[in-house]
Amino acid sequence: MSLNENAPENALIRQATIEDVPRILELHFAGLQETNSCSADSSLDADLYQFAQHYQRDDARFVVAVSRQEIIVGMGAVVSVAADHYEIKRMRVASHCRRQGIAQQILDELLTFATRHHPLWDILLDSSQTQTAAHRLYENNGFVCYGEALIGGDIPSYLFRRPGLSSTAQ
């Protein structure tokens, strides 16, 4: 758990629990609607409906940002998806809480988890093309855009990669 004293909201970053899933889903779908990133492919959200199976594992971490009022205002996850890399998923901050450093707090927590467990592994993520502030956040944290894809077949997205230590040594 960490508390950033410089963030006006003083968001507490903690491990998400099963009890958080209803608010996680609410925040997730609000973010999709806001960025016009809703997909007809409902399988893209299966991990959130099977939260324990996907995120309560040793090789995954799902965190939430909680405001002083004890409301979940942000979230993010990192999951081992192959034998050599992690994927960051589900990064969201409620619209009324943006530009307060909360996304950076969440990302810091996820990167710390990933690099502590497997510092040599690359970290991948995708982000819809409309989320320019998120792209800046990722680039400021060592991620490089390496391609484009249609996520779910219909959401134009950029693909980002942060090289692990083995990649940077070459």
Image (cartoon, grey):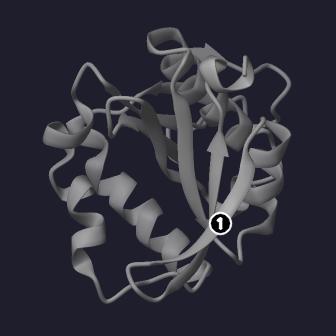
Residue 34 coordinates in the image, percent (x, y)? 60, 79
How far across and how far down the image is residue 63, in percent?
Answer: 45, 33
The residue located at (51%, 83%) in the rendering is: 155
Q: Residue at coordinates 21% horizontally, 62% vertically from top-left?
A: 46
110 versus 73 height, above or below: above
Q: How many marks?
A: 1
Element on which disc 1 rests = strand
**In this image, 29 relative to 73: left or right?**
left
Q: Residue furthest front?
A: 170
From the top left corner, tell me how far across and down residue 23 is, in percent. Answer: 37, 54
The picture places residue 73, in percent across and down from the top left corner, at: 56, 48
Q: Amino acid at mark 1?
A: Gly
Q: Residue at x 16, y 38 (%)?
A: 52
Dot 1 alpha-carbon crowd within 10 angstroms: few under 14, some 14 to 19, many 20 or more? few
User: In the displayed structure, does residue 74 sit left or right of residue 49?
Assistant: right
Residue 18, relative to residue 30: is it above or below?
A: above
Residue 102 in the image: above or below residue 25: above
Q: Which residue is mark 1?
A: 147
Looking at this view, is 61 or 81 the one in front? 81
Q: Quadrant of residue 35?
A: bottom right
Residue 65: quadrant of the picture: top right
Q: In this picture, is 50 found above or below 67? A: below
Quadrant assignment for the C terminus: top right
Q: Looking at the rendering, which quadrant does residue 28 occupy? A: bottom left
26 left or right, relative to 105: left
